[in-house]
Image (cartoon, grey):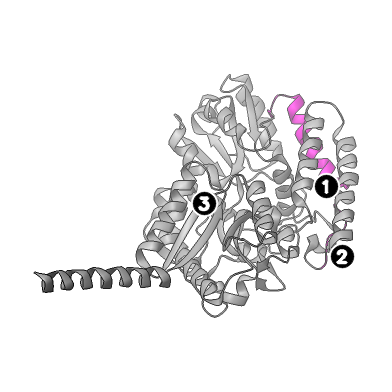
Amino acid sequence: MFKKSIIILTLVTLFTFSAAMVSAQTIELEFWHAMSGGRTAAVERIVDGFNAEHDDINVTAQFTGSYAETLTQGISAVRSGNPPHIIQVYEVGTQTMLDSEAIVPVYEIAEGKIDFGSVIQPILNYYSVDGKLYSMPFNSSTAMLYYNKDAFAEAGIETVPGTWADIEEMGLQIIENDAANHGLSFGWPAWILEQMHAYHNQPYANNDNGRSGRASEVYLDRDFAKMVLGTWTDLVEKDVIAYGGREYSANQDFLAGEVAMLIQSTSSLSSIIESADFEVGTTFLPRFEGQGIGNSVIGGASLWVMQGHSDAEYEAVVEFFKYLSSTDVTIQWHKDTGYFPATNAAVKTLMDNRWFSDNPNYLTAFLQVLSGVQSPAANGVLLGNFVEIRDIVDTAVEEAFTGVSSAEEALDKADDQADSVLEDYTELFGN
């Protein structure tokens, strides 16, 4: 009996010691993100899949609030000496992250281990500086036009709009036929103004949109920006455009049939299709005739690696990024959310499996982002304190839409305020 007890005690001790050893060898990674709602489940699905395949690495995904809140908390955590390993930052935070001295560039830890060349070119271009990738593409999107096919049919419209003149003509026809109260609404108006610049190959700021040097002035007071906002304001006065707020509120007006067209991020596609009680169509952003041809610009966010961790932890981060960029996971993320499939291999597989043929709305924005030119203007703008500048532009749009100021006056004021923000930022970080 005594001998049996000794054997049992020995086995328990060995088991406890082995478990402790496994625990000690497991690398823990913290991943802070801003994906709320159904996107939280999509993130957790990726993390759970990775953890199931890696006994020696455990990733913990933590929702840390909005994009702005997540960015602020991430920088603060580095300064307090307790940073996460990975933080999701939206595209307007790119310059801030580059200047933060809080990051480890992705190319430094992953070059030669991950095939960056497989990333879709416009996405790769946005998050690269001097040809080097600084953050890992994750949830990439762009804007496109959604339309209510039932409302179009009711109004007798058999084509899709290709220009802003078409938006006006079709919008008035929709209103006259009581197919909807308004023609169009859109979310993220400051971003859509940026989109119009990129889409028509018009620079938004100096120094090649901040890509050949730090941007010190924006071009909101130039003819192109004023033409865009002036056109939108005119369409508001004609009831063709209904103001849809600064983010996603316009989606509800579209789903409720209040408006027949919506310009919104591709990230809303899955939820809109699931929620609509009408047939949804999608098409390219409308163009202004007689302007240049650029490209719709990338939105969404990327993953940044934070300073303050060991080489072994960075090797684990690379393993996680390799998993993220694998074809199956990239396809899963795309189908779960509507964000772009970010690699050429994923796109090929989706095409081979007839996903885009069977679900053409998911193809629209992807074709749109590949149909234009690549140039500094079309690659998107890098601005210091871009978050504040977007708020300034959103205010300008609201003032123009509500008649507080003319489009020209609103943009002149916004230009002065944005340039002041850039001046303060340059004083803080240097040229």
From the image, tell me which residue sits under label 1: 224
Q: Residue at x 74, y 60 (%)?
A: 95
Residue 225 falls inside the magenta stretch: yes
Q: Quadrant of residue 167?
A: top right
Circle 3 sits in a helix, a strand or a loop, which is it?
A: strand
Q: Earlier in the sequence, mark 1 or mark 2?
A: 1
Seen from this angle, which residue lies furthest left?
1
Q: Quadrant of residue 145?
A: top right
Q: Residue at x 55, y 36 (%)?
A: 147
Residue 159 shows in the view = no
Left or right: residue 243 versus residue 120 is right
**Nearer to us in this view, 238 or 397:** 397
Q: Are marks 1 and 2 in contact (CB under 8 Å)?
A: no
**Nearer to us in this view, 292 or 330:** 330
Determine which of the numbered discs, if any, sits on residue 430 in the image.
2
Type of amino acid at the residue the image marks with label 3: Gln
**Nearer to us in this view, 167 or 344:** 344
Q: Is residue 402 above or below residue 342?
A: above
Q: Quadrant of residue 32?
A: bottom right
From the image, tell me which residue sits under label 3: 62
Distance between the alpha carbons at the discs numbered 3 and 2: 34 Å
Magenta residues (range): 213-242
Q: Earlier in the sequence, mark 1 or mark 3?
A: 3
Q: Earlier in the sequence, mark 3 or mark 2?
A: 3
Q: Position of residue 196 (x, y in %)?
A: 73, 48
